Image (cartoon, rainbow, N blue to C red):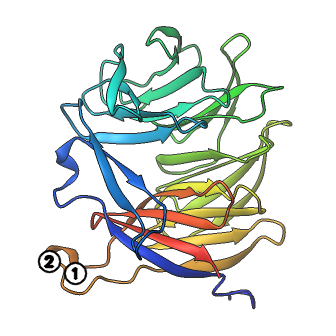
């Protein structure tokens, strides 16, 4: 049962990501300023990959975008010019996940080749995390924002969450407990917690300082993505067509967001779409969610 704080969010906007499917191999840059009643205006497409784009992140200063692709490469784009500034080669199979460090000076990537790689922004691979590494696809990689204790967290289809220290690039701990492949891992804004999720439908919380399991939040379906709120003690999960928002202080479901189907859409898009990715605005007031019907839905705190 949901607590009395249901309907914390209202659907603010829906905008189209692209008229073609994921095979367009491009990234889209959006202007999110609200002018003339419009919100979410595409301003530029970024090209260069020759296969599906699997992940994209922005640098914290907003100057660069970093993407990973099934073409086994990463690309760093200058958002002012829209040009590729660096191409990262080294993975032997599809790149599934990429991330920037808090200071934007390091990059980590995870791949179907079962390795995670640490790069500098010049495109040079500085380290390959293999000693004690994953035995199946690495589906998600994340830096901790805690610069006093720099770590990388990875998860994969071997059902494991691994924590790596960046001071010597060694394995600090492996977390066990999931019973199915993992799609996603996320680190809290203060770097104290991480959460993981995937096929078994369980969001598992881990203490990164003490290297121990904390508790499980059942979602009721396969978890595609997880993210912490930047300024509230909340964890959000993309589960099928819904977005679960848990209040971690009370360990209860605070809200359950569902997409509205868009009238006039093609028959292929009439079925309920799945939520595949999540991102908060920096102020924690707006939640962006990408769906399998090529739409980005935007919820705002009510």
**In front: label 2 or label 1:** 2
Q: In which quadrant of the rendered image does the N terminus lie?
A: bottom right
Residue at 70%, 60% in the rendered image: 216
Crowdedness of circle 1 by 10 Å Cα count: few (<14), some, many (20+)? few
Q: Which residue is more in the foreground, 177 or 133? A: 133
Locate residue 194: give its quadrant.
Answer: top right
Q: Tell me the residue that label 2 is attached to.
A: 266
Residue at 34%, 41% in the rendered image: 54
On the picture, is 20 further left or further right than 282? left
| Above or below 155: residue 244 | below
x then y, percent, for residue 208: 78, 38
| Above or below 107: residue 301 | below
Residue at 23%, 50% in the rendered image: 22
On the picture, is 275 further left or further right than 190? left
Circle 1 sits in a helix, a strand or a loop, which is it?
loop
Q: In which quadrant of the rendered image does the C terminus lie?
A: bottom right
Asked if one can make out residue 138 in the rendered structure from this viewpoint, the answer is no
Circle 2 sits in a helix, a strand or a loop, which is it?
loop
Locate residue 231: give its quadrant.
Answer: bottom right
Crowdedness of circle 2 by 10 Å Cα count: few (<14), some, many (20+)? few
| Above or below 262: residue 217 | above
Residue at 50%, 80% in the rendered image: 11
Q: Tell me the residue that label 1 is attached to.
A: 270
């Amino acid at each position: 049962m949901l607590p009395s704080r249901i309907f914390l969010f209202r659907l603010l906007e829906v905008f189209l990501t692209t008229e073609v499917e994921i095979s367009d191999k491009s990234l889209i840059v959006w202007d999110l300023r609200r002018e003339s009643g419009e919100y979410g205006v595409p301003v530029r497409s970024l090209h260069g990959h020759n296969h599906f784009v699997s992940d994209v992140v922005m640098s914290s200063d907003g100057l660069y975008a970093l993407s990973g692709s099934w073409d086994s490469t990463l690309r760093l784009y200058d958002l002012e010019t829209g040009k590729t500034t660096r191409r990262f080669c080294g993975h032997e199979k599809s790149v599934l996940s990429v991330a920037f460090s808090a200071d934007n000076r390091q990059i980590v990537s995870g791949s179907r080749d079962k390795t995670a790689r640490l790069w500098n922004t010049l495109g040079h691979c500085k380290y390959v995390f293999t000693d004690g590494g994953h035995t199946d696809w690495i589906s998600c990689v994340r830096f901790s924002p805690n610069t006093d204790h720099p770590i990388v967290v990875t998860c994969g289809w071997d059902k494991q969450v691994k924590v790596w220290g960046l001071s010597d690039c060694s394995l600090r701990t492996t977390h066990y407990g999931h019973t199915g492949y993992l799609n996603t891992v996320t680190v809290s804004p203060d770097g104290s917690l991480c959460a993981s999720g995937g096929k078994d439908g369980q969001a598992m919380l881990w203490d990164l300082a003490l290297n121990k399991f904390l508790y499980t939040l059942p979602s009721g379906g396969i978890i595609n993505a997880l993210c912490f709120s930047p300024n509230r003690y909340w964890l959000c999960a993309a589960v099928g067509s819904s977005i679960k928002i848990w209040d971690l202080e009370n360990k209860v479901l605070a809200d359950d967001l569902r997409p509205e189907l868009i009238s006039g859409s093609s028959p292929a898009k009439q079925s309920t779409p799945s939520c595949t990715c999540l991102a908060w605005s920096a102020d924690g007031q707006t939640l962006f969610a990408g769906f399998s019907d090529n739409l980005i839905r935007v919820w705002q705190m009510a």
